[in-house]
Image (spheres, coloured by chain):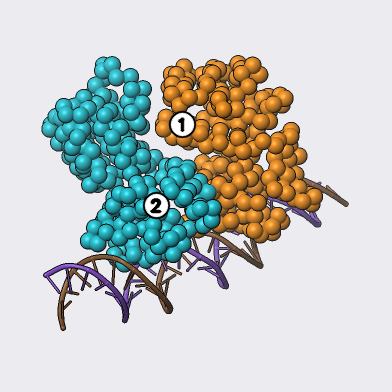
Chain colours: A orange, B cyan, C brown, D purple
DNA sequence: ATTAGGGTTAAGGCAATATTAACGAAATTG
DNA sequence: CAATTTCGTTAATATTGCCTTAACCCTAAT
């Protein structure tokens, strides 16, 4: 399978560097320098993965992300944001704009390549997708309506619980470290205690099933249907 | 955590200057004067960070970088190149050989120290996101899911056991000394008794098969499918 | 027989996680 | 805009399960 990656950033240097490294690995790469061009490029290029800077002229990454998600085929693509080290990820963390993941700048090519491979592998696995819904096992997550359906039973989860669930379910089986979870759901700058995660996990287990969320001691949590 | 830095340059003056400034900050520093010695020093010293000149006699920095990356543990270390300001080594050439970053000569000690601190901070964070899958024989190690599959049978191993296994499997057939294992799995500063390793080996043998882990008396252990 | 090096087992300590309740802040309601 | 409910977090306490060690065993070499 020939994988296509769309890079979006307003700095030409970064585009060149990333493009070079990804093409060396055999990926087909196209680039765009702002959000508006990214949407156009997405339509014609139809990539499996989009790597996009958050802050850009014309149209920022999150707005572009939303627009792409609204297009036909737009729910299939994996969208990952490039964020500055200390940038606040909490806005995106809700995946409100539809992003799947993020990678922190400065970007090291080796890390990038391995992450890209992981994302594309994930893309291969999620073959069934309809609209804004993501489903795994008997579990359906509707990001638009903030609703979760588990074997027919409908739940309305509070924001944090929902975001935590969405994160874990986005890659079933994958272990998310506590640090990663804090970054993704709460944001880099927010300081909350470790026990906070536990409590939210507790509530998810109560509502959706004790056995779905596995603890890996000293590491983190994972979702497993 | 005691951080170790390996300096590599053919000019003794530079080595002295950098060493002095880094040791003043509490880092453990070793030096090497060419690429070949750098590879050796890496194996015995196991630093978290390597600062390396690009141009050197015997073996240049980029070649040394590639060799180190091929060693077990070689993907964990952060490698930064020292480059002359006007040198034509594009950053990419360095990145291509597996370098993470670079710093331009002439080097100002204060800048250096702050950069080194930033790199080591990054090193602390990256260890949990590295690598995804490695497999040998009927054995598959999935670092992302913290799962080990042996001929179809799936195991969940505790952290230390998992790390020990991952280390041994990273170079099948290679003998790892007890000292090396302690450094790699427990860290350089943690003091644990020798029997601790035995016990963990015991558990691995119990779970995955007695014959997979071979004892080399007076030396250490190796994994062999 | 002695020693060195490793193997084995189980128990205790301890750090990581689970759980519950309670409080303040937001949001919702009357 | 008070009254009420819901949410997010923390504090306090309980519990879990991993790590380590101590104590003892085994084997091979001297």
Tell me residue A82's x, y (percent).
52, 30
Q: Which residue is mark 1?
A: A113
Residue B124 as seen in the image, left or right of residue B80: right
Tell me residue D11's x, y (percent).
55, 63
Label 2 crowd (10 A; few <14 / some 14-19 / many >=20): few
Label 1 crowd (10 A; few <14 / some 14-19 / many >=20): some
Secondary structure found at label 2? loop
Residue B225 image label: 2
Would residue B128 be visible to someone looking at this image?
A: no
Say which residue appears at 59% left-offset and 30% top-offset: A79
Tell me residue A190's x, y (percent).
54, 44
Quadrant in which the N terminus of chain A is drawn: top right
Quote the CA–CA distance across marks 1 and 2.
29 Å
User: Which chain letter goes with mark 1?
Assistant: A
- Which of A203/A124 is in front? A124
Say which residue appears at 42% left-offset and 29% top-offset: A109
Given this view, does label 1 or label 2 mark the residue nearer the observer? 2
Tell me residue A21's x, y (percent).
43, 25
- Which of B193/A125 is in front? A125
């Amino acid at each position: 399978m020939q994988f296509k990656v769309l890079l979006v950033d307003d700095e030409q240097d970064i585009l060149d560097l990333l493009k070079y490294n990804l093409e060396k690995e055999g990926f087909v790469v196209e680039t765009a320098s702002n959000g508006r061009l990214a949407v156009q490029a997405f339509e014609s290029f139809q990539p499996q993965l989009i790597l996009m800077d958050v802050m850009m002229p014309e149209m920022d990454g999150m707005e572009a992300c939303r627009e792409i998600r609204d297009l036909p085929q737009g729910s299939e693509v994996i969208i990952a944001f490039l964020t500055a080290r200390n940038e606040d990820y909490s806005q995106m963390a809700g995946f409100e704009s539809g992003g799947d993941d993020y990678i922190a700048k400065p970007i090291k090519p080796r890390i990038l390549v391995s992450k890209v491979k992981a994302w594309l592998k994930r893309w291969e696995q999620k073959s069934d997708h309809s609209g804004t819904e993501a489903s795994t096992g008997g579990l359906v997550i509707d990001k638009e309506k903030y609703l979760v359906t588990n074997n027919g039973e409908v739940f309305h989860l509070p924001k944090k619980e929902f975001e935590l669930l969405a994160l874990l379910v986005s890659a079933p089986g994958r272990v998310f470290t506590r640090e990663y979870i804090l970054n993704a759901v709460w944001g880099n700058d927010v300081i909350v205690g470790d026990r906070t995660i536990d409590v939210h996990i507790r509530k998810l287990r109560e509502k959706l099933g004790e056995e779905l969320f596995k603890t890996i001691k000293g590491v983190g949590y994972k979702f497993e249907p």
